[in-house]
Amino acid sequence: MRRGQRGYIGGLDTRLKESRCRANLSRSQVAEQIGITPSTLADYEIGHRQPSLPVLVSLADIYGVATDYLLGRNNINLPYLPNTTGLTDEQIDAICYVIRAMKR
């Protein structure tokens, strides 16, 4: 999908490149981790193509950002919420309690 086409996500290219650079990773390193070629990643970063949803999620995971940030839905470049896989319900509740307490 190219600029000007219906469904094109403006700014995604810039956010992808900036996020990769902030993570101090080369295109080759990232491409290898998600099973694409470095030239495909370059196409994403210059706006010639846009990644599929699974690739976008993988990129967000690698860069430690939310997909909403990459998509331009928010301008806050914060890491996504921690992965709670393997934690008990009590541990997850404790994390939520700490977050609520910090917001006060």
Image: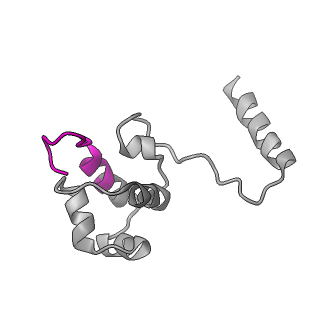
Task: State the residue in front, 5 or 77.
Answer: 5
Q: In the image, 51: left or right of 57?
A: left
- Residue at the extreme top: 104
Q: Residue at x 65, y 54 (%)?
A: 83
Residue 59 percent across, percent down from the top left: 41, 59
Q: Residue at x 44, y 47 (%)?
A: 67
Task: State the residue in front, 21 or 55.
Answer: 55
Residue 30 percent across, percent down from the top left: 38, 70
What scheme was used to colour the molecule? one colour
Residues rendered magenta in the picture: 1-17
Q: Residue at x 14, y 45 (%)?
A: 3
Is residue 8 a member of the stretch shown in magenta? yes
Task: State the residue in front, 9 or 60.
Answer: 9
Q: In the image, 40: left or right of 33?
A: left
Is residue 8 depicted above or below 73 in this figure?
below
Marker count (numbered):
0
Is residue 86 depicted above or below 12 in this figure?
below
Q: Quadrant of the C terminus?
A: top right
- Residue at the extreme right: 90
